[in-house]
Amino acid sequence: MLDLSTIISPTLLLNEQKCQANLKKLTQQAKKHNIQLAPHFKTHQSAQVSQWFRDYGVQAITVTSIKMARYFAKHGWDDITIAMPINIREIEAINSLASQIRLTVFVNSMETARFLHQRVTAPLPFCVEVDTGYHRSGVISDNTEEIRAILATAQDSQLQFTGFYSHAGHTYEATTHQEVERVHQETLQQLNQLKETFRPAYPDLQLSLGDTPSCSLMDDFTGIDIIRPGNFVYYDLTQHFVGSNSVAEIAVCLAAPVVSVHPERNEVVTHSGWAHLGKDSLTDKVEKSWYGYVVTLTESGWSAPIEGAYVAKLSQEHGTLYLPDEYLEKVAVGDLLGILPVHACATVVMMGELTTFSGEMIKTMSVQAV
Amino acid sequence: MLDLSTIISPTLLLNEQKCQANLKKLTQQAKKHNIQLAPHFKTHQSAQVSQWFRDYGVQAITVTSIKMARYFAKHGWDDITIAMPINIREIEAINSLASQIRLTVFVNSMETARFLHQRVTAPLPFCVEVDTGYHRSGVISDNTEEIRAILATAQDSQLQFTGFYSHAGHTYEATTHQEVERVHQETLQQLNQLKETFRPAYPDLQLSLGDTPSCSLMDDFTGIDIIRPGNFVYYDLTQHFVGSNSVAEIAVCLAAPVVSVHPERNEVVTHSGWAHLGKDSLTDKVEKSWYGYVVTLTESGWSAPIEGAYVAKLSQEHGTLYLPDEYLEKVAVGDLLGILPVHACATVVMMGELTTFSGEMIKTMSVQAV
């Protein structure tokens, strides 16, 4: 039980039970399909939370930067993939960490392969990231010529090809289960085509997938060996509207002190700006952006969203909440309201630490020395 | 001179000369109109940068939270205004700091006035924030009845009424000098009306204004005693499009390593996501959002923006930059590109530290113990 009177400033609350249930759900999903879960830790960025994954048998993890890799390596993780095209300017840090743990990187171009061939001083497993339609990064999946050239360049060095990865980020633009399904099937098809093409030369190559919507929702993982979802640990409203989770599964909530009440326009201002929530928005039917749902906090969690209430505007530290009459009447300056985030990854980055309902303080890498 | 080869990861660069010129410009603006500059420190959030303001005679400052007030008090500032409706849950921290320095707060409601009347234990100067049209917080400026009630409630306590404040944040929506002028004149008119009404009872009351566009651009400050702009210290593209500054006056730039090049769609990916830049966007003529301008970095600064280049998409750590053919041809994996931010306050919050061209590391409160 958390004594809400002890919360005086904006505080990110973590419902550990919901978080554990989310971990269990994805672990079961992976087990059911006989695939490895190598979760992305960019959402929680916390050594403490990372330990909870151990109980579910997680051994390999995914991050977005060498900085994050170093942080988790320091906290006992020894099989880490940096799921971003490798930044070759950081070669010294990469060599250093690769000499201590199994560090896997993404090599997506001949230029990068050539550079690494010359400069890598420790065994360095790598994936080739392939672009299956999201068009952010990666080799276009049917460009087998480029892939062959990368693999040829990597030979006779400490580089070790391990397989293909795709982040089908365009599932986030899906608004129906069918759209996620369509994107997912296209990705599966392209990855399996590559597996078939390159398996004769690389019999151990593995396929891995990155996005939370596919990993949460889909039932067909034909040919996939590893999934690397991140957001599922907390979930959020963006994922909810894609269909990945129910609102009840969202495990984080910002406790925001009410600093002014404006009944004439159905608004209250809370201390909860983009410096706390991040600035991600969703758009309603009339193209109006909003930044979160509003809930009532209790000593053991929070209510379902207040119907008709939402975060309407964000400044750096002011959050403007629209509240319907019947709820607004009960709200006074000095109260605490809860806000369910549009994008949990952003809210966690902004806040840097979380408080559980047993009163434990959870720190992330941004407030912990690496 | 800064050796660019030493920059291996995303790094926020600060051009100290531009910053000093911005300080000088606003100081001269204040002097010219015989008003006090009590700058808002939420943009830089840095004890080191705060010392530069001393050379320009700044003695009183503005912040957004008790946390920020404590940080700057620890670094020698003893006249601090928290420009946000006071969070009464933080009363103990407020009393504690108010017993050490001159701490001014905003009291915008009877509820708050009543609470403080009972609970304040140290002299506590306060402004009444008035809403002159932005409709975020503050008493509607013609509601003199509410204001009288607040002032009456504050009597016979350690609360000391000092005057009225308005943040005319709707100047940010202006697209022409004339629109800023119109909003500014309306604000001036409303504030001066209040001065006239309440001066007989409070002969020392002062008027203060908060927004950077008005403070940067306007030439009429009739009746205004104090200006509290923040963003001008670095400026950014949002302010540029309102008209507050030229692009050349922007003093911060994110150095972003190129991690992949995609000539087929005129894009490169840099390590520069919303976790580095923040997620503020501007919108072009065809309603497409973009997140920054692209510049070439040199050892002493950066170029004018590359024509036709912009930050097109942001993920957590990936930044997708659109580059025109002739520039793209010269860019390779491992290069460093510069990004001018849409919103400097956000970029500074995300990065937490800055590097000057003399190689000095500037820290903000988020990476410094308070």
Image (cartoon, coloured by chain):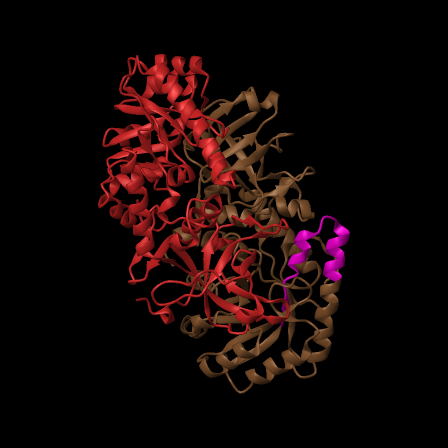
Chain colours: A red, B brown
Residue B178 falls left or right of residue A191: right
Residue A192 falls left or right of residue B278: left
Residue B180 drawn at (x, y percent): 72, 54
Residue A238 or residue B370, whichever sits in front: A238
Does residue B3 appear anywhere in the picture? no
The answer to which quarter of the image holds residue B361 is top left
Residue A92 or residue A340, whichever sits in front: A340
A203 within the magenta span: no
Residue B351 falls left or right of residue B19: left
Seen in the picture, residue B20 relative to A35 is either above or below; the reply is below
Q: How many marks?
A: 0
Does residue B218 appear anywhere in the picture? yes
Task: Give the residues drawn in magenta, as a range.
Answer: B164-185
Residue A200 drawn at (x, y percent): 30, 12
Residue B292 falls left or right of residue B65: right
Residue B312 drawn at (x, y percent): 57, 35
Residue A96 or residue A134, whichever sits in front: A134
Quarter containing the C terminus of chain B = bottom left
Seen in the picture, residue B146 relative to B324 is either above or below; the reply is below
Residue B177 drawn at (x, y percent): 75, 50
The answer to which quarter of the image holds residue B211 is bottom right
The answer to which quarter of the image holds residue B89 is bottom left
Residue at 43% x, 53% y: name it.
Answer: A247
Residue at 46% x, 64% y: name it.
Answer: B69
B165 within the magenta span: yes
